Every structure is written in C-alpha cells, then in structure tokens.
Image (cartoon, grey):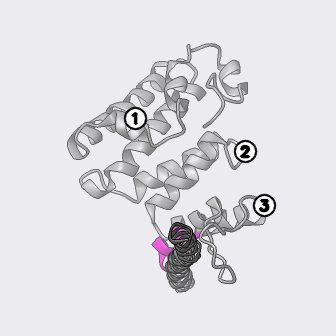
Amino acid sequence: KSKMALSSLLWRTATTKAPAASRRVACFKSRSLATASNSASAAWRERVQQWQTTLNLADNGDASAMCDVGWAKHHGLIPSSSSSSPSSVGKVGGKAMKEALQFYKQSAALGYAPASSLLGDLYFYGKDEPRDLSEAKLHLKKVLDDTSEDEGEDAYVRMRALRKLGSIATWEGDDSTTTTSSARDCFTTALATCRTHLGGNFAFLLSHDPPGDFYSHLARPRGGNEDRRRSPDFGGGELG
C-alpha cells in the first residue's frame, strides 16, 4: 500500500506541476511577444513622425528633404500611418514614380547635386525610366555645375558624374580625336578626384552602381557609331 501511495503521490505531483510550468512558459512567451510588438510599434510611430517632418521640410522648400521624399517615393519606402507593421511600405512605380521625379527635379532646380545625380542615373541606366543619354547628360553636367572640384564633400557625386559623362562621350562619339579627348578628360578628372578626396578607392565607388553594368560598358569593343546608338543596353548584360 505504501508503494502504491508513493507512486500515486509522484504521479499526482508530476501532473499538477506540468501544467503550471507550461503556463509559466506560455506567460513568458506572451510577455516577450507583447514587448516585441510594443517595441516595433514604437519604432514605426517614430518613423511615421520622421516622415511627416521630412514632408513638412520639403513643403517649405528644403532641397535635401525634397530629394529624400523623392527617394522614398521612388523606392516604396513611405510608412503608412494606419499600419503598425514595419514591413508596410508604399507602392513603387506608376504615380509614385512620377511624384518621385517631380521631387527630384524640384530639388535639383535648387542646386542640390545629389538629386541631379539620381536623375542622371535614372536616364543613364534606364531601369525605372526609359534610357535617354541626352537627358542623362543634362543632369550629370548640372552635378558638376552645382559642386566644386576643391570640396571633398562634393567629390563622390562629381566622380560618378564624370565617369558616366566619359562613357556617354565614348558611346555617342564618332571616333574623332575630339571625342576621344573629351572622354579621356572625363575619366582622367574622375580618377584625379578619387585620388585627391576619396583615397583612390575607385573599385569601392564602382560597387555603388548596378552590379556588372559599368564594367560591361567599359569593356564593350568599339564598333560603328550606328550600332552604339541603336543598342538598347550598349553591350552590357541585364541591369541589376
């Protein structure tokens, strides 16, 4: 009887303690999930507030804020004030892309070089807008007009603009000495800017463009002028 009583006691102890332990685990998980949810919601509310502040600055003519708003619309990074999910973003393309272009152009018109650089990229690579090298040249040249070769802070956008202008001069040229000299001047100045202000890290700067795209353009054998103008991707692979 004593053995049976002991076994019964052990069985009752196990069955009564197990649910309590499960409840503690469930309660801990619930508290952890609630804490994580509250933290995500707080971060999301802060992001929405920052977005509203940026919009207000853009409305008041701040060129940098205009460019930021354009970037957010371009890449679908607009937070939804009605959502608590950090993954909720705006739609990319269509109306959003048109609005992004408008903000980029307004910012560029105020002399903000990064906006002109982004516009140049859009038309140079033709990823989100049809490729238009004439339009790209206008924006890339404006980058140079709105910056100084003596300012280290301007070096990054200047170098990117110069090497793209050098490529355009090569593709659209007529193999004349003038065209070759113009392209060479752009590339040489870009390298000099990189060495003077950016530690000569040219490969690092190339990595900021679509993968494989710029190198494939440089490596393309020069053919007839008609081929260069007609080719949709200038011999490069699919844009990354």
180 is higher (above) or lower (below) than 19: above
**225 drawn magenta:** no
Q: What label does residue 94 carry, if any?
A: 3
- The answer to whether residue 166 shows anywhere in this view is yes
Count of picture labels:
3
Q: Residue at x 65, y 19 (%)?
A: 225
At 45% from the left and 19% from the top, the residue drawn is 177
Q: Residues within 10 Å of mark 1 (few under 14, many from 20)?
A: many
Relative to residue 92, is residue 77 drawn left or right? Answer: left
Nearest the viewer among 165 and 196 is 196
Earlier residue among tags 1 and 3 = 3
Residue toward you, 238 or 48: 48
Q: Amino acid at mark 1?
A: Cys
Measured Cα–Cα span from mark 1 to mark 2: 24 Å
Quadrant the C terminus occupies: top right
Disc 1 vs disc 3: Cβ atoms closer than 8 Å? no
Please identify the quarter of the rendering in which residue 5 is found. bottom right
156 to 214, vertically: above or below: below
Q: Nearer the viewer, mark 1 or mark 3?
A: 3
Q: Is residue 65 magenta?
A: yes
Residue 58 seen in render: no
Give the residue type at disc 2. Pro
Q: Which residue is mark 2?
A: 130
Which residue position is annotated with label 1? 186
Looking at the rendering, the stretch of residues picked out in magenta corresponds to 62-69
Q: Earlier in the sequence, mark 3 or mark 2?
A: 3
